[in-house]
């Protein structure tokens, strides 16, 4: 579908708000300043205060410059955000060099810029930043000033301890970076998929609204066209046999009559659609869903299961119609010869099972079916991005449906999709009016015209 390609091409384009980095850096500036002052003046450890505050001041200056140069809502390109994070890494590395290197307990903060990058920037920039941090951590393991300690004494840590800290820092960077990237990526994919769902639902609702627009147009244009026809007849009588205007008046009358005929047809279509589209039986909904998929070389078999009570008659729901159509399309795509739809209803539930004779869902992705960007089935067909099934599942679940994806245990059958609603949820999802062939009571008898019992 068209939404797949568009979202696939844009889903890795992220932008980080500048104000977010500015606030995080101010927090870092305050924390670094307090740590330096406490260690230097409260514990009276020998700290190179001036060099430390030069580095802290550089961060504060950059924050001030960016805050005054750009608006708070400015969004950074990935490259620009990466360079700002690289500055943060270098500034923190400089502070750690002055205060003991990896023996400084604050060395774990080297992982913070990598985590920020993993949640907001493309993977290439995150990998580059991660390698830079690992390089700085390695250098700090060998080259650094002594850790500030009590005056007259020097705290020397064994190299094996420093090596352990290095392993811990690198492990934290790798684990937290990968974890943050995976969580953020899944959130981005889900957001893109939900956007596609809203686009599809909006499109279906617009299509459904065209019928009402046609009826409104026919009603509104009827009066001016009648006036045009009346005036043209009066002009024809007044002009008599005037050869200069007779043909023009006749053309004007013929075109106004043609417009009236077109509006009459629109009104007729609107009346017919009120019976067949706005309100339909469950069986009619199934047949309409299947019809566009019959000409693809796959046999579609319709079977009505065991039913109790009168057949439900409901208003048309574009989301449900699209969702069922997408599931049928998916079954046709992966079937070998036939797809079977079996539906049923009783006093409590309404249900539908879609079964194809393909190879079914691979076991390793069966539990993830319906998630966005699950891409393939055990078939020779090329897999899409999985947005179709996600959209169908989302729209149907929004209507109150329960959907179960499975592989059939019957010989010669492949994948099965079971969709079921409680009877109340099914009616509510289709307009909130429990229309049926007499099985359901009418809560608003004065609003009905008696046709529900005749359907």
Image (cartoon, rainbow, N blue to C red):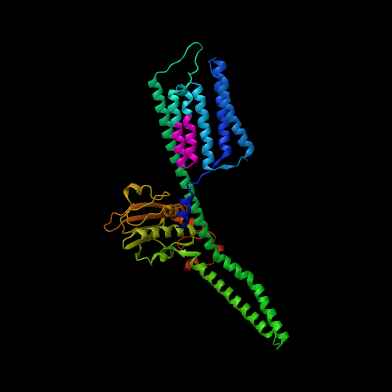
**Highlighted range, magenta:** 110-133
* 289 up-or-down from 396: above or below: below
User: Is the stretch drawn in magenta largely helix, strand or loop?
Assistant: helix
The reply to whether the magenta stretch includes residue 146 is no
Among the 4 quarters of the image, the one containing residue 35: top right
| Residue in the picture at 61% in, 40% down | 72
175 with respect to 94 (left or right)? left
The x, y position of residue 33, in whole percent, is 57, 24
Residue 449 appears in the picture as rendered: yes
Q: Closer to the camera, 177 or 268?
A: 177
The x, y position of residue 165, in whole percent, is 41, 25
The reply to whether the magenta stretch includes residue 129 is yes
Quadrant into which the N terminus falls: bottom left
| Residue in the picture at 43% in, 32% down | 173
Among the 4 quarters of the image, the one containing residue 155: top left
Judged from this view, the residue extending furthest toward the left is 411
The x, y position of residue 161, in whole percent, is 39, 21
| Residue in the picture at 52% in, 35% down | 85
Q: Closer to the camera, 336 or 257?
A: 336
71 with respect to 285 (left or right)? right
Say how many tags the image has: 0
Residue 399 appears in the picture as rendered: no
Q: Closer to the camera, 74 or 455?
A: 74
Judged from this view, the residue extending furthest toward the top is 152
Q: Closer to the camera, 427 or 241?
A: 241
* 46 up-or-down from 193: above or below: above
Judged from this view, the residue extending furthest toward the bottom is 241
The x, y position of residue 442, in whole percent, is 51, 60
């Amino acid at each position: 579908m068209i939404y797949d390609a568009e979202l696939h091409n844009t889903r890795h384009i992220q932008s980080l708000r500048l104000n977010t980095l500015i606030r995080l850096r101010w927090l870092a500036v305050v924390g670094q300043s307090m740590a330096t002052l406490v260690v230097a003046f409260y514990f009276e450890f020998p700290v190179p205060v001036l060099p430390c505050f030069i580095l802290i001041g550089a961060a504060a200056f950059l924050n001030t410059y960016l805050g005054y140069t750009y608006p708070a809502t400015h969004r950074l390109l990935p490259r620009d955000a990466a360079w700002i994070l690289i500055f943060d890494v270098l500034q923190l590395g400089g502070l750690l060099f002055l205060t003991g290197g990896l023996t400084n307990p604050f060395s774990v903060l080297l992982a913070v810029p990598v985590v920020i990058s993993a949640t907001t920037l493309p993977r290439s920039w995150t990998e580059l930043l991660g390698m830079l941090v690992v390089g700085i951590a390695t250098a700090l393991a060998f080259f650094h000033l002594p850790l500030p300690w009590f005056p007259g004494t020097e705290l020397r840590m064994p190299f094996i301890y420093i090596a352990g800290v290095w392993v811990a820092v690198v492990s934290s960077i790798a684990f937290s970076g990968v974890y943050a990237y995976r969580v953020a990526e899944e959130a981005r994919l889900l957001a893109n998929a939900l956007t596609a769902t809203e686009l599809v639902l909006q499109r279906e609702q617009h299509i459904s609204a065209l019928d009402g627009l046609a009826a409104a147009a026919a009603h509104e244009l009827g009066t001016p066209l009648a006036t045009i026809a009346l005036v043209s007849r009066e002009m024809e009588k007044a002009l008599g046999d005037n050869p200069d205007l007779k043909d023009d008046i006749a053309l004007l009358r013929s075109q106004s009559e043609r417009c009236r005929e077109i509006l009459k047809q629109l009104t007729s279509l609107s009346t017919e659609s009120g019976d067949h589209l706005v309100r339909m039986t469950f069986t009619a909904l199934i047949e309409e869903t299947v019809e566009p998929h019959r000409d693809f070389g796959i046999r579609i078999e319709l079977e009505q299961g065991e039913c109790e009570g009168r057949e439900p008659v409901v208003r048309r729901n574009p989301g449900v119609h699209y969702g069922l159509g997408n599931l049928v399309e998916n079954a046709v795509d992966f079937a070998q010869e036939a797809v079977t739809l079996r539906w049923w209803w009783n006093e409590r539930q309404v249900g539908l099972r879609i079964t194809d004779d393909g190879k079914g869902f691979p076991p390793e992705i069966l539990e993830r079916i319906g998630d966005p960007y699950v891409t393939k089935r055990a078939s020779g067909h090329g897999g899409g991005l999985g947005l179709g099934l996600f959209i169908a599942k989302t729209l149907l679940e929004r209507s109150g449906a329960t959907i179960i994806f499975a592989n059939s245990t019957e010989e010669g059958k492949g994948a099965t999709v079971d969709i079921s609603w409680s009877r109340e949820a099914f009616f509510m999802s289709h307009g909130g009016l429990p229309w049926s062939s007499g099985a359901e009571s009418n809560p608003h008898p004065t609003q009905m015209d008696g046709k529900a019992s005749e359907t």
